[in-house]
Each structure stands twice: as structure tokens, then as C-alpha cells.
Image: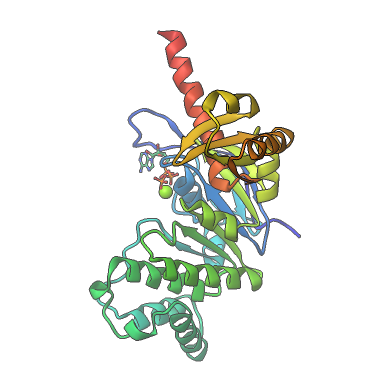
Amino acid sequence: MEPAVVARDLTKVYPTSTTGARALSGVSLSIPAGQVYGLIGRNGAGKTTFVRIGATQLMPTSGSMTVLGDDVVKDAGRVRQRIACVPQESRPLYFLNVDQLIYLYLKLRGMDRAEARRRTDAVLEELGLSAVGKQLVNQLSGGMRRRAMVAMVLASDAEVLYLDEPTTGLDPLARREVWGAIRRASQEHRTVLLTTHYLDEADALSARLALLEGGQVRLEGTPHDLRARVRHPYRVTVEGVLGLSELQSYGEVSEVSGGHLVFARESSARDLAIYALGKGARVSMGPVSLEDIFLQVVGRSIEEDGEGVATES
Ligand SMILES: Nc1ncnc2c1ncn2[C@@H]1O[C@H](COP(=O)(O)OP(=O)(O)OP(=O)(O)O)[C@@H](O)[C@H]1O
Ligand SMILES: [Mg+2]
């Protein structure tokens, strides 16, 4: 199947930028259709810039991007009909109630009345918004307002959905409801491009992921691929008797409450677990989490930057 979104050597320098820095620098990504694709990275990594170019809100400086085969610059009109977007900073129309907000959005996208009504009721129910359906959007709490925006976009019939931090500010139960709705969208073979700082969320939902850092792709692949690509794919926590010096030969050690956390290669992790158990320590071992990968990859690039500065001075 053709990928839904393809970026080729995409670069963006904001004309307003005082430093002339590249918000995106040679980003090439291929986002498969009908799946959730996670875009992660630190603040300022370029996630929103990528999403906004894909949503035809922003022009690339160079390179290209296509959505379902249409170019985001040359065929922007066609792209817009097939996408829907929850921007990072969104302000829904305040004078409407939640029900009207969603229903009118669907009508504006060209849906007939009966279908718009049916989908509005279904999404209100699905995202736990039925009780506030008649409340004005400006009287909702921040998290509820965010949920209403997400509901609006998920209820649409767009084939590609951009969700830029859809669950920021949501309570844990509401987050799970949004996860369910995102999963359902991908079961309907819609493509979801999701940015998030919640790495458990990125891991739970994404079929593939890209880690952006400084406007460039640092890692890309399935969660399994990403684990295979880091230097230390295993984490071992050791509680009790062992000291730092005993652990350092096995991998990268950091102190955690009650003991140490060691990132290691598989064989070293196994050796360490056997050694530590023999010494009477409490040990747990497993593959690294997405957060561990993030810290290993992004943390190292920050250290390298730091070292670069130190060498020059
Ligand atoms: N309108 C703008 N004018 C100038 N520079 C901008 C503008 N918007 C973003 N930038 C810069 O572009 C870079 C990427 O920003 P972007 O918003 O894409 O990051 P992000 O990954 O979405 O970050 P966050 O996680 O904080 O949302 C940053 O250095 C940012 O300062
Ligand atoms: Mg952003």
C-alpha cells in the first residue's frame, strides 16, 4: 500500500526566526497508511512544524511533502479535504456548545445531517462528553475543551488525522478514552500522525515512531526496531548491597531510589543479574522503555553538544 504521508528532504527556516536556525533540516519520512505514527522529541525539536506543513498551514523552505499522493503546496486544496487537525494550541469557537461545535464542524466538512448527528452523538459518548454536550465551550475546563477538539476531529471522515499533543492536560481516564478513539480510527484504516511527550502513550499507540532532535530524524522505526538500535537495549535495576564500582563494568549506571539502574547489552544484563542475585540483591531486568531510549539517544546528543563546546573553549 502507498504510504499516506511522504516527506522528502523537508527543511523549514521560519522567516521570522532571529537566529535563522532550521526548525526542520532534511527530514525524510514515510508514514504508512492506516496506522498510528508517533512523532516524539524534546521541546523545539520540530514536531509541530512538521505537522503544520503536512496540514498545509505552513510552507516548507525546501524539500517536499505529499499527503495521499497530493503535494501539500501545489495541491493544498485537495489535501485539506482529506485531512483533519488538532493543533497544539487550539481555541474552539467559544459561543457554541460542545454538541454544536462537533455537529457544525462535520456539516462544514460536507457531511449530511443524519450522518453528522449520528457521529456527533457517538463521539460525545465515546469520549465521555455526553454530560457536557449542552455546555458552552468557554465554560468547560481546559482538559474538557481539549477533549472536545479531539472529539471533533476524530468524528470527521478525514483519512489523515494530525493530532498535535492531543492528550496534554487530560486526566488519566480521559487519556485512556482518547487512546481508545485513536485506536478505533486506525482500525477504520485512517492514518493518525500523533505527537506526544507521553512516551508510554507513543509506545502504546504507535505502529512506527520517529524521534526528532534539532529538526532531524534521529531514530525511526517500529518500537521493536528502536529498541534494537540503541547501544543498551536492556535495563536492570539492582536494589541493595552492590556499590557503583561493582556495576560500572556492565553498562551505564545511574542511581535511583533504593539502588541503581543499569542500561546494558543483553549478555551483560544477564551476567549482571546473575552476579547481583548471587550477592543477595533484589534484581529486576527487562527491555528498555521508550523513555529509556529517548534519554539514551537525546541525552547523548546533548552531552556531545556540551563536549563540543568544552573542546572549543
Ligand atoms: N512562528 C515561529 N517563528 C520562528 N520560529 C519558530 C516559530 N515556530 C516555531 N519556531 C521554532 O522552530 C523550532 C521547532 O519548533 P516546533 O514548534 O516545531 O517544536 P516542537 O517539537 O513542536 O516543540 P514542543 O514540544 O515544545 O511543542 C523551535 O526552535 C521554535 O523556536
Ligand atoms: Mg509542538
Residue at the extreme bottom of the image, as rendered? 114
* Left or right: 168, with 154 as reference point: left
**Quarter of the image with the N terminus in it:** bottom right
- Residue 249 x %, y %: 63, 24
Residue 272 can be seen in this image = yes
Of residues 266 and 135, the one drawn nearer to the viewer in this rendering = 266
**Quarter of the image with the C terminus in it:** top left
Residue 67, located in which quarter of the rendered image?
bottom right
**Is 217 rendered above or below residue 94?**
above
- Residue 83 x %, y %: 53, 64
| Residue for point 37% across, 83% down | 99
- Residue 211 x %, y %: 56, 42
What colour scheme has been applied to the protein in the rendered image?
rainbow
Of residues 186 and 313, the one drawn nearer to the viewer in this rendering = 313
Of residues 74 and 16, the one drawn nearer to the viewer in this rendering = 16
* Left or right: 95, with 198 as reference point: left
| Residue for point 28% across, 82% down | 135
| Residue for point 56% across, 39% down | 238
- Residue 46 x %, y %: 47, 42
**Is 16 rendered above or below residue 103?**
above
Residue 186, located in which quarter of the rendered image?
bottom right
| Residue for point 65% across, 62% down | 35
**Is 30 rendered above or below residue 173?**
above
Count of numbered circles in the view: 0
Residue 26 can be seen in this image = no
